[in-house]
């Protein structure tokens, strides 16, 4: 007699605990895919906006104009643009107080940019820990469902006088589905986490490099009476 061993049938006839495990893993997988697509488009947007701002910055545009545009755009500005605005704002405030110490001017601007950098990185890294948790925990949750299902199957077989492969196979197959779903949830999360972590590291390096380059520009002009009319072009 042929038995229906389709995935749907196996899930339908699994024990309650295994079904709960499967449902939890499927919900987790759906949530992780939502995070993956959101982070994929979000990081792409951050990279494009940062690159656009860097091109504009090194094109020799007036620093005051760049600062005014950044403050007007506020939350819609690129992360790198907000870092620039933070440093420029602190630099101008200290200059208005006629602070003569060049080192204090630069330290204040650099601290402001570092604080803004940390805020931007916290926002960019949001939900990344969720993917790490899904990738590390889901296989074990699926394994728990498998162990429970196998235990439940063998308890049921203990009441049978004759045990054959046909009677063992359905219970074992039902239990193994939980492990398969756990891997289905974990593998994309791990791959996405590694990809996003690498992309975020590149964004962090780009931002830190910009902070140092802009600090050098401020250092060259800290002794002047006003902010220079234009930023030097990158060479």
Image (cartoon, helix red, strand yellow):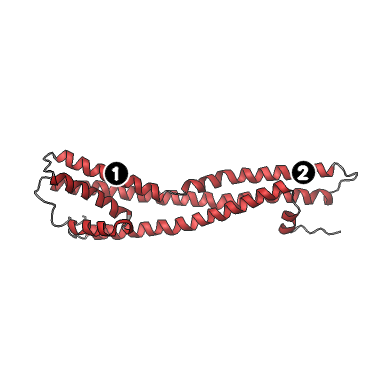
Q: Secondary structure at mark 2?
A: helix
Residue occupied by mark 1: 114
201 vs 181, nearest the viewer = 181
Along the viewing direction, whichever of 197 and 114 lies nearer the viewer: 114
Q: Residue at x 26, y 59 (%)?
A: 72
Give above or below for 19 relative to 69.
Answer: above
Which mark, residue 100?
Answer: none
From the top left corner, tell me how far across and down residue 146 is, in percent: 70, 45
Residue in view at x 71 percent, y 57 percent:
7
Query: Where residue 63 appears, x then y in whole percent?
Result: 18, 56
Question: Considering the numbered disc 1 on the image, is that residue within a helix, a strand or a loop?
Answer: helix
Task: Tell me where residue 41 sits by quadrant.
Answer: bottom left
Relative placement, left or right, of 130 versus 7 is: left
Mark 2 closeness class: few <14, some 14–19, many ≥20 residues within 10 Å = some
For label 1, the crowd category at 10 Å Cα-Cα, with few meaning under 14, some 14 to 19 and many 20 or more, is some
Q: Which mark is residue 152?
A: 2
């Amino acid at each position: 007699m042929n038995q229906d061993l389709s995935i749907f049938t196996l899930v339908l006839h699994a024990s309650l605990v295994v079904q709960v495990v499967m449902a939890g893993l499927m919900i987790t997988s759906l949530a992780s895919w939502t995070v993956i697509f959101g982070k994929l488009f979000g990081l792409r947007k951050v990279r494009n906006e940062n690159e656009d701002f860097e091109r504009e910055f090194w094109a020799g545009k007036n620093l005051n104009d760049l600062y005014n545009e950044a403050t007007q755009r506020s939350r819609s500005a690129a992360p790198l643009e907000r870092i620039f605005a933070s440093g420029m704002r602190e630099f101008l405030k200290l200059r208005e107080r006629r602070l003569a110490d060049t080192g204090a001017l630069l330290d204040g601007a650099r601290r402001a940019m570092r604080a803004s950098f940390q805020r931007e990185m916290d926002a960019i890294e949001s939900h990344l820990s969720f993917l790490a948790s899904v990738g590390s925990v889901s296989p074990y949750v699926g394994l728990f469902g498998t162990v429970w299902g196998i235990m439940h199957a063998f308890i049921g077989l203990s009441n049978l006088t004759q045990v054959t492969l046909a009677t063992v196979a359905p219970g074992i197959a039902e239990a193994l589905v939980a492990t398969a779903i756990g891997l289905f949830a974990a593998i994309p999360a791990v791959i996405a986490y590694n990809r996003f972590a690498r992309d975020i590291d590149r964004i962090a390096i780009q931002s830190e490099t910009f902070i140092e380059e802009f600090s050098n520009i401020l250092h060259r002009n800290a002794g002047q009476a006003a902010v220079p009319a234009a930023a030097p072009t990158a060479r």
